[in-house]
């Protein structure tokens, strides 16, 4: 009888051990990050890719699938991402199903500085390196370097926010005395802007001139358009 009882106890013991092992394993897995999910707020990963973000986190040993949640430092994850040259803002959090989720806003270039060095000017007026993944279609800005990007920022920023100007202006050149000259798409005349002041007034005058010259079919007859006087447009014919 005792022998039979021992035979019965052994399977029960094995089942109990298996249950406890499975429970412990499940509990241990629930303490680990199940997946790292990268989300770009604008829906476009133009200047930095999902693969690049994952690689950055893994190489710095801050986040990867399988890492224990207790040692995951969300502040460090956010700090690492926010220090990336192509990221404007990043947020990191854990979802209820154990996924590490990151929401990333990329920096947006509004102009490309060309000359001895080449880089972007972003929408916050800061220098931004070129991306190996994507080249932005923005006006080329010359006569500027990383030490004086603020000189061109108000002008380039205004152009970027205006649909008409973005469509027609392809270049911004800084001249001596912090004055500027603009290059037009498909037109061979230069636009002398002068100093980056009274920007709205000067561009409103230019739009009025452009509309009238287009109606009169005279756009091709000019070699220079001067906006520096603010209250008027002075044109020089070919």
Image (cartoon, rainbow, N blue to C red):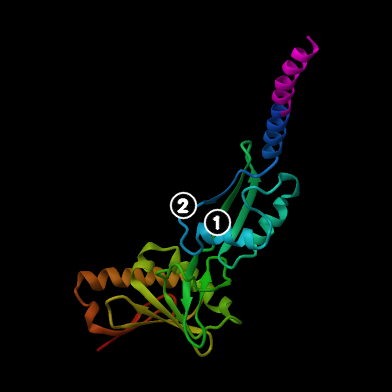
Residue 43 numbered tag: 2
Q: Which residues are magenta?
A: 1-17
Specify which label sits upstream in the sequence, 2 or 1: 2
Image label count = 2
Q: SS at mark 2?
A: loop
Q: SS at mark 1?
A: strand
- At 52% from the left edge and 84% from the top edge, which residue is drawn? 117
**61 in relation to 67, above or below:** below
- At 31% from the left edge and 72% from the top edge, which residue is drawn? 209
Query: Would you say 128 lies left or right of 221 here?
Result: right
Circle 1 sits on which residue? 105
Query: Would you say 185 lies left or right of 157 here?
Result: left
Residue 41 numbered tag: none
Task: Find out whether residue 4 is within the magenta segment.
Answer: yes
In the displayed orientation, state which residue is furthest to the left.
Answer: 217
Disc 1 packing (10 Å; few <14; some 14–19; many ≥20): many
Disc 2 packing (10 Å; few <14; some 14–19; many ≥20): few
Task: Find out whether residue 121 is within the magenta segment.
Answer: no
Q: Main secondary structure of the magenta part?
A: helix
Residue 143, x across and y down, in percent: 49, 86
Residue 79, x across and y down, in percent: 69, 59
Look at the image and tell me in which quarter the C terminus lies: bottom left
> Viewer-proximal residue, 175 or 232?
175
């Amino acid at each position: 009888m005792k022998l039979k009882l021992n035979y019965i106890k052994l399977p029960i013991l094995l089942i109990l051990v298996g249950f406890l092992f499975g429970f412990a394993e499940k509990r241990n897995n629930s303490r680990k990050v199940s997946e790292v999910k990268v989300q770009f707020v604008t829906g476009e990963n133009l200047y930095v890719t999902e693969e690049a973000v994952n690689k950055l986190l893994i190489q710095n040993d801050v986040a990867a699938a399988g890492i224990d949640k207790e040692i995951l430092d969300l502040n460090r994850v956010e700090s690492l991402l926010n220090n990336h040259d192509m990221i404007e803002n990043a947020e990191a959090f854990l979802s209820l199903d154990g996924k590490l989720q990151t929401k990333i806003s990329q920096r947006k270039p509004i102009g490309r500085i060309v000359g001895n060095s080449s880089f972007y000017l972003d929408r916050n007026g800061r220098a931004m390196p070129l991306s190996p993944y994507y080249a932005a279609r923005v006006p080329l800005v010359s006569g500027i370097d990383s030490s004086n990007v603020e000189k061109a920022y108000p002008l380039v920023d205004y152009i970027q926010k205006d649909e008409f100007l973005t469509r027609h202006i392809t270049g911004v050149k800084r001249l001596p005395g912090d004055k500027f000259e603009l290059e037009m798409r498909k037109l061979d005349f230069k636009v002398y802007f002068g100093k980056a002041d009274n920007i709205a007034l000067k561009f409103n005058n230019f739009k009025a001139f452009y509309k009238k010259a287009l109606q009169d079919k005279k756009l091709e007859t000019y070699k220079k358009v001067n906006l520096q006087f603010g209250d008027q447009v002075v044109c020089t014919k070919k």
